Image (cartoon, rainbow, N blue to C red):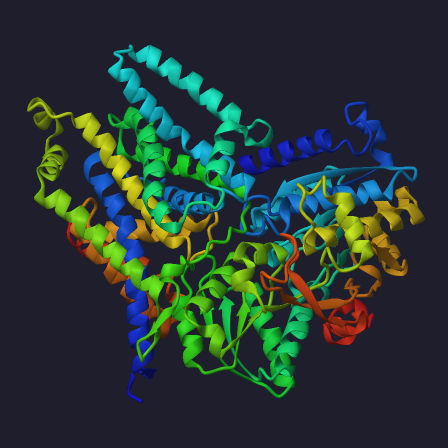
Amino acid sequence: MTTTRRQLLSAAGAATIGTGIGGRPWQGARAQAANTIRLGVITDMSGLYRDTTGPGSVAMTQQAVADFGNRGFTVEVLQADHQNRPDVGSNLTRQWFDQGVDAVVDVPTSSVALAVNQIAREKNKVHLNSGAATSDLTGAQCSPNTVHWTYDTYMLAKSTGAAVVKAGGDTWFFITADYAFGHALERDTANFVRAQGGRVLGAARTPFPATTDFSAFLLQAQASRAKVLGFANASTDTVNCIKGAREFGLHRSMRLAALLMGVVDIRALGLEAGQGLLLTESFYWDLNDRTRALTARSRARNQDRPPAMVPAGCYGVTLHYLKAVAEMGITAAKASGVEAVNRMKALPCDDDAFGAGHIRADGRKIHPGYLFQVKSPEESTSPWDVYKLVTTTPGDDAFRPLNEGGCALVRS
Amino acid sequence: MDEIFGIPTPLLFGQLLLGLINGAFYAMLSLGLAIIFGLLNIINFTHGAQFMMGAFVAWMLLSLGSADAARIGLALMLLPLVLLLLDWLWLKLRLAQPIRLGLGVVVSAAWIAACFLENGGPVSQALGATFPNGLSYWWALLIGPIVVGASGVLLERLMIAQLYKLDHLYGLLLTFGVGLIIEGIFRNEFGSSGLPYRIPPELSGAWDLGFMFMPVYRGWVVVAALILCLATWLVIEKTRLGAYLRAATERAELVQAFGINVPLMITLTYGAGVALAAVGGVLAAPIYSVNPQMGVNLIIVVFAVVVIGGMGSILGSILVGFGLGVVEGLTKVFWPEASATVIFVIMAIVLLTRPAGLFGRA
């Protein structure tokens, strides 16, 4: 508890002093409070997901604030580490809201996001989610205070799953991280496989996060004689699985489908081992002129790297939120989180990362999903040149239909 | 096809073999922990971080020509080794202890500052220029343990040595804290997602055993682990040096009275234990993701192995390491969800029935 508070304070202090956004905080910050929007980026700064979210998410939120410019109010960006623990995340969020933070940004790790979701609703603040995967955020647990921007398990399952089945991979075996996220991803993918006439031959649930060696599970997958091996896990787990699969020669007899994987993971795996993999993202830095412009613009903030998908989502959702605030007036936006989110839903979205889109009644941001194939080392021309675009799923088909999520906001 | 408990026999054989391979890692790491505990009476919780450092040194050596972070990282990691060599020289020159300490501080400060210069400073540039293609896996197997072992020696001299008079618990807390700090530094510098490391070309490929596909590299890991375990056991049980070590474990004062430099022996033992962890790290680099957390999960299991084997028992930790690898492998077939727990269930049972461990002396 003490450490948590100290981390929060130091992080907040560092952000206030370090970012230089929000004018000069040492000159009567209190007097300016009414004219300042305070955004709290709560993310994984020290664990497994640090490289896919973390400092990148903070940098891209600041980029959005810089691109938004000054439209009569100041914006302050705070940051904190939730350590992938729902209890830590809840405490931080509660404190922040009590101290006048208007919106929390990013919140990766599904279990933390679901906890923060409740608090934002209770305090009538805004939850701008980019990093969490669970489709429950806009389904059974949807909230009028939440926008879920970047991706979700349904989108990943549909895009990658359907593409692999269509290419002839009609029998599947899953290696699944044994917790809420892995189960959701396996369930959503299995549904698509079955809907397309495929069969699921089995699944191995691996203890999370205590598994380092996956070879035993890979051997079971091989013995199942399925055509496709689906990895319903993330990050280091997926990287270790794919390394092992190549080592044991699984890639010769089975097709590998990584259901949640990003550029950062591909870099960790290396193109040599990763080439040919199919995966889905909603943002890639080298997608079009606008994404390349954004990448060039944000390079200095991002330690000379292109933004990954989740940080890009932080950019998009923050920019859109600030536009809504500018339109409805800062006083009204600060007074009610629900109203601010309603304005976000009414306003059409457009930004350099995701292009044109909109936010649905259940809080789901709608934009295209892209199926990529990982390049071979020969095809890649620069260190971050890792994907070839295979297909684009238009926004309306990419996500779960509005009436199938079971969100209470839709019925009313 | 024949089946045992509903599992096809070939699959079962495959899993037994895989269990043995994982067991090789457990044995190698718990061996280091056991010899350290045997002589120092300290549970070295930095072991996981030192295992990780071994893997990182392998990556740094391979990427010397291509990544700035690798050059600078290696330059910094060479500092303990340089300090030890300089200190040895200063000792030969008969410099007084405070002067050696002062010189050491000055050299470290200059060395670290140089690494933060533009382009990584002279040392890292020299490294990059000398080895533009990097150094291969085989060099890493040699250099990794030396570099990481040297950092262990320094850690023992500067910090752990201050705690011998106190309860074991203080050593545990110190090494645990140091491990967390090291992992934090690596996470800040290299990120959490890991770095790519290829299987060396000489060891890539696989044998078809009929019942399974056996990667050559995993076979090499088992062989290497067996050689290391056997060599360590022989040194400790069959040589004069080993006899001194065992004697010092029982009665340090008496051994010292015979004119044997026990503090030096303790320091070198710690260094050797750390070097064993680093070898494990280098061996693990091609098959597991090289990332700052790679030792965290392993160290808990390895600690359990040492407890089950009997704290400080060399033979116990080797046999139990391999044995538990197999048990865990079988659990992964019959009940995958429990595979992370089974080792601790066994530990609880062993502690209740034989508190000193299977091979320990009460």
Quadrant in the picture for the N terminus of chain A: top right
Count of labels in the image = 0
Residue A256, picture quadrant: bottom right
> Residue drawn at (68%, 73%), measured in percent from left and top?
A159
| Depicted A243 relative to depicted B113: above or below | below
**Looking at the image, can residue A140 be seen?**
no
**Whole-percent x and y of residue B119?**
58, 32
Q: Is residue B353 above or below residue A9?
A: below
Where does the image place residue A406, in percent across and percent down from the top left? Answer: 72, 72
Quadrant containing the C terminus of chain A in the rendered view: bottom right
The front one of A216 and A41 is A216
Q: In this image, B126 relative to A367: left or right?
A: left
Relative to B288, is A2 on the left or the right? right
Percent x, y for residue A265?
57, 57
What residue is drawn where x is 41% and y is 80%?
A223
Residue B98 sits above or below residue A86 on the image: above
**Residue B237: x %, y % from top left:** 10, 45
